[in-house]
Image (cartoon, grey):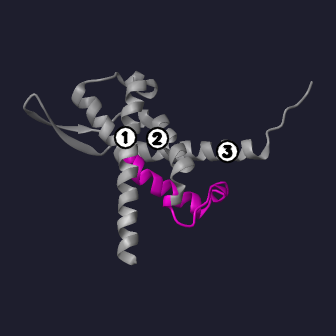
């Protein structure tokens, strides 16, 4: 019987993923009591983001994309800093979720408005992932533009 041992890199990435997953779940659970107003068929209705936590895996996917492609938007935070799960990890979570949460909420509102997807299919729907990703990419673009503007103002 041969025992396989994870490499240090695989272990770090797995631990980071687990902590990000818990962060996403906790934040989305907190948001499930928040509301939004929408007019459907001429009727104004107040909805609650009651099923928002069903989008946790999409949030996790967005966090991975943010880590892999956009970490440079957070000054002083490197990938290696995230593995210690300290203050820089907390900063990463806060900064990335400032882009991810609105992306998920926008997608959620579109799901309600278009009456797409049953709650049980939300976590595994390719169309929903594409919508989340489009919203996320757009919000990251806005963040990049904002940081560039702030940088120019400081120069």
Q: Which region is colored magenta? A: 73-101
**Tag 2 near tag 1, CB within 8 Å:** yes
Q: At x 78% / y 46%, what residue is drawn?
A: 8
Position of 40 with respect to 32 (left or right) is left
**Tag 1 near tag 3, CB within 8 Å:** no
The residue at the far bottom in this view is 155
Give the prevailing secondary structure in the magenta stretch. Answer: helix
Q: In the rendered structure, which disc, 1 or 3, sits on the residue that comes first in sequence?
A: 3
Q: CA distance from mark 2 to mark 3?
A: 17 Å
Return the residue nearer the eye: 109 or 144.
144
- Crowd band around label 1 with a 10 angstrom C-alpha radius: few (<14), some (14–19), many (20+): many
Helix, strand, or loop for circle 1? helix
Which residue is the site of mark 3?
13
Helix, strand, or loop for circle 2? helix
- Crowd band around label 2 with a 10 angstrom C-alpha radius: few (<14), some (14–19), many (20+): many
Q: The C terminus lies in which quarter of the figure?
A: bottom left
């Amino acid at each position: 019987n041969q025992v396989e041992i994870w490499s240090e890199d695989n272990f770090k990435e797995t631990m980071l993923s687990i902590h990000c997953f818990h962060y996403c779940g906790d934040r989305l659970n907190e948001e499930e009591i928040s509301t939004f107003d929408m007019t459907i068929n001429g009727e104004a209705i107040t909805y609650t983001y009651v099923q928002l936590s069903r989008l946790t895996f999409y949030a996790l996917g967005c966090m991975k994309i943010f880590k892999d492609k956009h970490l440079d938007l957070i000054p002083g935070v490197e990938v290696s800093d995230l593995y210690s799960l300290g203050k820089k990890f907390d900063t990463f979570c806060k900064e990335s979720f400032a882009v991810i949460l609105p992306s998920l909420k926008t997608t959620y509102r579109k799901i309600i408005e278009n009456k797409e997807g049953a709650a049980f299919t939300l976590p595994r729907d390719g169309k929903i992932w594409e919508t989340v990703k489009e919203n996320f990419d757009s919000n990251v673009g806005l963040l990049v533009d904002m940081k560039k503007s702030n940088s120019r103002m400081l120069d």
